[in-house]
Amino acid sequence: MGRQNTQKNLAFWVPVKRNKVHPANLKKQTPATFQKSLRATLLIGQAFSLLPVVGIFSNDANNVKFIITSWKCFYSFLSFFGQIFIVVMCIIRVVSTEATLNATTPIIFYGTTCFTMLMFFRVATAWPDLVQHVAKTEELYPNYDNKLTRTCQITCAVVLLLALSEHILSLLSAFAGAIMCFPNKSVYEGFARHFYPWVFNCLPYSPLLGMITQFLHFQSTFIWNFSDLFVICMSYYLTSRLDHVNKKLAAAQGKYLPEIFWKSTREEYCRATQLVRKVDEVISGIVFVSFANNLFFICLQLFNTLEDGIKGNGDCNSRSKKTTPLSGYEAATYFLFSLVYLISRSVAVSLIASQVNTASMVPAPILYDVPSPVYCVEVQRFLDQVNGDKVALSGLQFFSVTRGLLLTVAGTIVTYELVMFQFNSPTADTDTTTLIPPNISTTATP
C-alpha cells in the first residue's frame, strides 16, 4: 500500500517539475555569468591600478589573460612604486620626529595600501584560471539570477559615491585647515603642506609634486574602499550559486522524489562548494586585508574620539575665525561622516560575506524533511556533506567569515576601547596634532 502511494506521488510530481522549468522559458533568460556580474567591479579596480588582466569585456573565459607586459601591469607597477615612495617619506618623518600614534598611522595606511596592491596582483595572476574554472561550472549548471548583475552594479555605484563624498569632505577639511595654518601661502601650496606634511617637510614644494602626491593619496583611499567592494561582489556571486541549489531543494521539500534527483542536486551543491573553496584560495588575502584594515581604523577613530572628542584639537583651529565654508566645523563634519561610513561598510562586508556560509547550511533542514519511503544513501551523503564541511570565505585561513565573526569583532573593539579608556587620563596633556581619519591627514605647523 505504501509503495503504491509512493509511486502515485512520484507520478504526480514529475510532470509538475518539468512544467515549472520549461525549456522555452529558459531560452528567454540570459545566464548570470561570473564575467558579466563582476565586469563593473573589475573595471573600477583597474581604474585604480588593481587586477591588471586583459579581456574583462569578453564573454569567453579563454580571452581573459594575465600579460605581464601589458599597459595595465605597467600602470600597476608605477602606482605601486608611487605608494612605496609615500611610505618611505612617512618613515623618514617618524625617524626625524617623535614616534607617536598619529605619526605612525600614515605608515600603516600607505603600507596597507602597498600590501593590498600585492594581494590584488596575486589575484590577477590566478584570475584567468579561476574564470575558466567558473565557466566550466556555469556550463554544467547555469544560473539564471537576473538580479545578480544589477545588484553588483548598484553596490559599486553606492560604495563609490559614498567614498567620493568622504574624500571630498576630507579635502574640504584640509583646505579649511590650510587657510588657517598657512595664510601667507597660496591656497594649493598651503593645502599640500598641511595635508601631506610627511612629503613637504622633507622635500621642497612644487605644484607637480603636490599633484602627484594628491593622486597617490586619492588612489590609496579608493583602494581601501575597493577591497571591501570586491569582497562584497564576490560574496554576491557565491551566494547566488548556493541559492540556486537551495531554491531547487525548497521546491522539492517534503515530496516523494527518486534517488536520481538527490544525486544530481548533491552533485550541483558539491560543485558550488568547490567553487567557494577555489575562490577562497584566490581572494583570501583580500579578505584578510579588508577585515584587518577596517578593524584597525575603527579602533583608531574611536580612540581619537575618547581622547580628543569629535571637535578635536590643533594648533591651527579654524573654528576661532569664521572664514571657512562650514565655519570651522569641516573636520568634525568629516569625522562624523567617515566614522559612520566606516562602521556601516565594515558591518555590510561582514554580513554579506557571511551569507556564503549561511546559504551553505540551508539544505540541512530540507534534507531532514525527506519522507521515509524515499530516504536513500544519496540523501544521507548529502546530509553528511552539509553538516561535515564548513563552507565560508576566510582570511588567509586565520578566520572564517560567519555571522558569529561580527560579534567577535565587536567584542574585540569594545575590549580595546575599555582598555584605552583606562589608560586615557582626563588630566593628561592633549596631543597638539589633529588626526583626520581615515585619510590620514596630520596638522602641520607653518
Image (cartoon, rainbow, N blue to C red):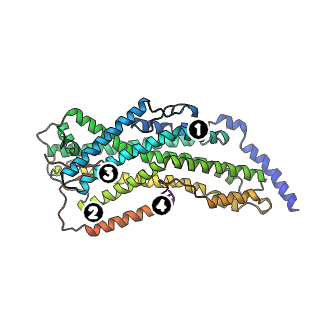
Residues under numbered marks 3 and 2 in contact, where contact means CB atoms less than 8 Å apart? no
Residues under numbered marks 1 and 4 in contact, where contact means CB atoms less than 8 Å apart? no
Distance of label 3 from label 4 (alpha carbons): 24 Å
Instruction: Report x, y in % for residue 11.
Output: 83, 50
Task: Name the residue that disc number 4 marks.
Answer: 405
Q: In which quarter of the image is residue 144?
A: top right
Extent of the magenta region: 397-404
Upstream in the sequence, badge 3 or badge 1?
Answer: 3
Upstream in the sequence, badge 4 or badge 2?
Answer: 2
Front residue of 33 and 396:
396
Task: Name the residue that disc number 3 marks.
Answer: 108
Residue 274 visible within the image: yes
Residue 330 visible within the image: no
Image point 44% across, 30% down: which residue?
A: 69
Q: Is residue 141 left or right of residue 435?
A: right
Front residue of 88 and 246:
88
Task: Name the residue that disc number 1 marks.
Answer: 132
Instruction: Report x, y in % for residue 241.
Output: 60, 47
Q: How crowded is mark 3: few (under 14 residues within 10 Å), some or many (20 or more)?
A: some
Q: Residues within 10 Å of mark 2 (few under 14, many from 20)?
A: some
Front residue of 328 and 312:
312
Upstream in the sequence, badge 1 or badge 4?
Answer: 1
Q: Residues within 10 Å of mark 1 (few under 14, many from 20)?
A: some
Callout 3: SS: helix
Distance of label 3 from label 2 (alpha carbons): 21 Å
Task: Name the residue that disc number 2 marks.
Answer: 306
Type of the residue with mark 1:
Gln
Residues under numbered marks 4 and 2 in contact, where contact means CB atoms less than 8 Å apart? no
Instruction: Report x, y in % for residue 266.
Output: 69, 52
**Residue lying at the far left of the rendered structure:** 184
Type of the residue with mark 4:
Leu
Upstream in the sequence, badge 3 or badge 4?
Answer: 3
